Image (tube, rainbow, N blue to C red):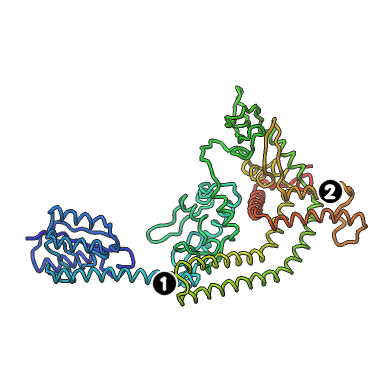
Amino acid sequence: MHRYFIYCRKSQEAEDRQVLSIESQKKEILQKFSEQEQLTIIDILEESYSAKSPGRPVFNKMLKLIEQGRADGIIAWHPDRLARNSIDGGKIIYLLDEGTIKSLKFGSYFFDNTPEGKWMLNIIFGQSKYFVDKLSVDVKRGLRAKLDKGQYPSKAPIGYMNDRNTKTIVKDPKRFTIVRKMWDLMLAGTHTVPQITEIANNEWGLRTRKSKRQGDKPISRSAGYNIFNNPFYYGWMLHNGELYKGKHEAMITYAEFEAVQKILNKPTRRCTKRHFFPFAGGMIKCGECGCSVTAERQINRYGSEYIYYHCTKRNKGVTCNQASIELTQLEKQIVHFLSKSSISESFTASCLKYLQKLYDMEVGERSEIYHSQQSAATACQKQLDELLRMRLRNLLDDEEYQNQKQELINEKHKLEEKMRDTENRANTWFDASEKAFSFAKQASYWFKHSSDEDKKLIMEIIGSNFVLTDKKLLIQAKEPFQLLTKAEQSLTAKKPRFEPQNNGLDQTKTAPCEAVRSGWCGLVDEVRTFFIEWDGTQQLLTQLNILFNRMENQENSIADPTSSSGKPG
């Protein structure tokens, strides 16, 4: 009497959507064969695994046990439970030829171990493989059709949700704003991805969407990296290495996405920090040897705590003789620099009034630029349509078609991004200018009354190339703040009594006053031009927005009690 393994399999993929469950297969098999004959069942093996490719662990273990003589045959509900690929199907036919498998029994098919029976079994295995292959082609075609229509064919990434009624992707009201804040932190360049993920989970309460089996959990570190690498958030969908334009509302711009990619690609050195020192970690360089300046805490014998900044002296080829500097002395120098870089409230008001006029003029003129860009995008789409017609006439092979198509898609993408930039450009440079003026007016006072984290952000906003030499900190202000300071200094030097806010821009001026006004207006124009052309405008604006929000949310409002200008008297 032959000995049998009962093998029941159910895949979780679409290929087995209409197949009986494992319990149903087992029940049908036992019911049928227990009534007909007495069988020796060695074991009942169950597996939830697709058979479209080899590598099923339970199936392979079963064949190995049969080869060892533990059983003589297999009972399954249907031949496609055993194999849907040529390797597994061929292995069963081969074991039948060798006599290792002496009998096969099926609940929905009769098999006879004869040449004709094995021939028919081979045909059924072939049909099973054909079904899987055809299903794969049909599914891929359906996915491409959805992607071409701008529809996302999968579960929406965090921040979005699938609308079952409209079959579209919509904003998740609970998570969209939080994920956008994560992008803002990343653009500011003040936090790493793990830090942003931790803030989103612990401070903002971000959780994954709850489903029947999983969800409602904090996002993982890898999920955080996936967010910042996913083009879905700027309105495009990546599928099999190809980008498709989505119909969903973009969370960020393409420029913001590119800025984040540059931040992510910067080399970082992992280190364990016990304390947070705002000006350490590579912000300041030693003027003698070029190494980074670090910080350490020291406690004297009376229990007083001090923080000292000093060179790491890791350049073995240079003997560095720089001494350390105490934190309070370092911060005094920073406050002095911020005070020198500050501007008055009256000058700020006049500059913003002038920029408002430039903004109004640009808004009126940008429609012409937009129509020109729109025409270029339409021409690019026509080229894509013509490329498809050439492919259908076999004038291009698949590789040429895909390469040229991707180039045109990228070009169209850039044009559409420029169109969005044209719509938002005036808002961006005006917001950046307005925030920069307000920041320059209050930076010194804010620095004195801020946390260490905010002090670091203030330094990153206003300056660069920080060098410490002989206990003196040299700071190079970023170009827009250099221009602001230069504009007010120029105005004060040429006409000390001139008050731009009191005189206004529309009133008739004397010749000397007009000359003065034209001088500082030219410098303000340079600020505007700089923000339009500078690649870092969006990042600076994000940093400024974060800082302004923090100042507004402090319990004690950051405002100077002695001066309306927001600076200490």
| The N terminus, quarter of image | bottom left
- Residue 223 located left or right of residue 525: left
Q: Position of residue 77 (x, y in %)?
A: 20, 67
Residue drawn at (61%, 66%), measured in percent from left and top? Answer: 415
Q: Which mark is residue 490?
A: 2
* Viewer-proximal residue among 12 and 454: 12
Kindly identify the amino acid type of the residue bearing the numbered disc 2.
Ser
Does any portion of residue 296 appear in the rendered image?
no
Q: Residue furthest left?
A: 1
* Viewer-proximal residue among 89 and 433: 89
Residue drawn at (11%, 60%), measured in percent from left and top? Answer: 99
CA–CA distance between discs 2 and 1? 66 Å
| Element type where label 2 sits in the image | helix
Residue drawn at (49%, 59%), measured in percent from left and top? Answer: 158
Q: Position of residue 418 (x, y in %)?
A: 63, 64
Residue drawn at (59%, 28%), measured in percent from left and top? Answer: 298
Question: Which image quadrant is residue 505 in?
Answer: bottom right
Q: Residue furthest top?
A: 301
Q: Position of residue 144 (x, y in %)?
A: 44, 70
Quick one: label 2, few (<14), some, or many (20+) residues within 10 Å?
some
Q: Position of residue 199 (x, y in %)?
A: 53, 49
Q: Residue furthest right?
A: 510
Q: Earlier in the sequence, mark 2 or mark 1?
A: 1
Residue highlighted by disc 1? 142
Does any portion of residue 365 appear in the rendered image?
yes
| The C terminus, quarter of image | top right
Q: Which mark is residue 538?
A: none
| Element type where label 1 sits in the image | helix
